[in-house]
Amino acid sequence: MENKYQKIYDRSIQAPQDFWSEVAKDVFWYKQPTKILNSDNPPFYKWFEDGVTNTCYNAVDLHVKNGNGEKIAIIYDSPITNSKEKITYSQLKDRVSIFAGALKEQNINKGDRAIIYMPMIPEAVIAMLACARIGAIHSVVFGGFAANELASRIDDSKAKIILSASCGYEPGRTIEYKPLLKKAVEIANHKPDKCIIYQRKDFKIELDTKNEIDWNDAIKDAKPVECVEMNANDYAYILYTSGTTGTPKGIVRDIGGHIVALKWTMKNVYNINPDDVWWSASDIGWIVGHSYIVYAPLFHGCTTILFEGKPVGTPDAGVFWRIISEHKVKSLFTAPTAFRAIKKEDPNGNFFKKYDLSSFESLFLAGERADPDTIKWAESLLKVPVIDHWWQTETSWAISANCAGLGLSKIKYGSACKPVPGYDVKIVKSNGEEAKPNEMGDVVVKLPLPPGTFPTLWNANQKYKDNYMSTYPGYYQTYDAGHIDEDGYVWIMSRTDDIINVAGHRLSTGAMEEVLSEHKDVAECAVLGISDKLKGQLPIGLLILKAGVKKKHDEISKECIQMIREKVGPVAAFKTAMVIKRLPKTRSGKILRGTIKKIADGEIYKIPPTIDDPTILEEIKEDLRKHNILK
């Protein structure tokens, strides 16, 4: 099967236009494209330039037209509100076309921007698809995001309408959206015309009659509308990268390439067929939610799960197993941090033993580097392939993966396997030379990027060129560092800014984290470089222990320091490993290493808008002080 992958990969690189022209035939077009790639103005490449299609038609109407209207499109499962709902493709078409009509009644038309600020409920997906139906450009902002961040996105997108809800739910707390919305609109220079608010059953709020409309009132007299014909290079959405400061960076997705690439990935990367149940445990506010909760599975015509909950605490560390068992999920895609949380709460897999997971075939991890220990733990529990793969908000689909639909390659722990067809991945050293096998450098992708990636930034062509395409001309700079081994496997070791310089030696914090995570008592860890007058930088390790560990913390720290000494070497100068209660993370599960570093170095830091719980930063500060690390 390895030969199948290699044959397809080689064709995608050697004859990209022929390859993607063939793939594009699997998509519905009002007008088939004849111009497959326009390379006249690099780095601004255009795929399927003269094609005409519609995102919503491909995600919904096409399946109804093909006689699959009674198939389940969405399974909504909310342990946090104890509610469930199954929506067929026919029902989804009805609800989307009515809400699209409601948007038309509010004078939202092709090219207008709509901000979607909603929790994980079916109406959020309906809002996205309704925008796509009429050619409006949606910009989903994670529900409960800080008011000033929401305001910056309103200003940058010049949104004409906001689609929201009365609240979102987290374990043990309700996040009221109205105060955040109100403040955001007050701060914003640009004022949206209207706001449509979905009232959640147990949390109804009073609406401002001037510019706020109840969702049910908006759809009451609305007439269903058909899909609008869209050019392949029109924009489907803007997604602002999380954690931005100042002017946010709006990643845009063009319609034609987005449909072609994402539909192709469901079978080829994930081995999902239209009759399968697929689950991506993310949030629609992030790129994984856009691509693999909503668009790719619906383009492919399979069943997608919309989950409102957490891997632990809703109600326990067995909720993932319950959902897989109950809904007969074939494959799950989530972040490594979710599995580390489950491993921490239930290291022996006691909850797992309660459920029948006979339908389950594979687990995919992405969003951050999956440490080998977590992968091995998941493998031993699940007895299925656990596949780490690598991609970014900018690309919208995997750059490097073990393509399950093309025949699984041998798994190498710590590697994101091989480049996915369409991506010509290279490792470049700081002097611009291509690295030798196993030599560390910047990970780049040769232009043009494949369809479905980002053709530019919203209203910021120059920023697109300067930020991504200038350091290594002819290549997209990923801002990840790593190496490619002698077998062509890609190893993503860290973000470029996570490479630390210890007395002139460039070392990967990711490689050190990999070692620490092998300690039998460590559930999760982070390594960061703090400034040091003598050596430039020194690594410190932050350790989260598994539940129920009785051993003394000092003992565990000494063992971890010794492990780094043995496996990375004395050159790492690794002398501090401290046990802490929890790590500060974004809501999508990424550890805020940069913020911790600033705290340790005594630098001014801004509380990131994406942080899950800001109180952790004070805990971290206290831990660093106790270990005499705080500058």
Image (cartoon, grey):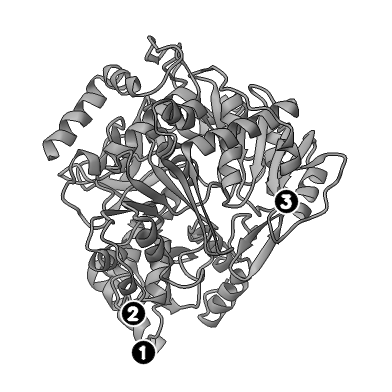
Circle 1: element type: loop
User: Which is more toward the observer, 293 or 12?
Assistant: 293
Point out the image quarter for the N terminus. Answer: top left
Reading the image, the residue beneath label 2 is 521
Task: Count how many numbered circles sit on residues in the image.
Answer: 3
Q: Position of residue 39 (x, y in %)?
A: 40, 15
Q: Can you tell which mark lies on residue 34? A: none
State if disc 3 and disc 2 touch (CB < 8 Å): no
- Who comes first in sequence, dot 2 or dot 1? 2
Report crowding for label 1: few under 14, some 14 to 19, many 20 or more residues within 10 A (C-alpha).
Answer: few
Q: Tell us which disc is closer to us: 1 or 3.
A: 3
- Name the amino acid type tagged 1: Lys
C-alpha separation, residue under disc 2 versus residue under disc 3: 40 Å
Q: Position of residue 383 (x, y in %)?
A: 22, 63
State if disc 1 and disc 2 touch (CB < 8 Å): yes
Report crowding for label 2: few under 14, some 14 to 19, many 20 or more residues within 10 A (C-alpha).
Answer: many
Reading the image, the residue beneath label 3 is 147
Instruction: Specify the quadrant of the image occupied by residue 328.
Output: bottom left
Q: Position of residue 522 (x, y in %)?
A: 36, 75
Q: Position of residue 492 (x, y in %)?
A: 32, 49
- Name the amino acid type tagged 3: Ala
Reading the image, the residue beneath label 1 is 551
- Who comes first in sequence, dot 1 or dot 3? 3
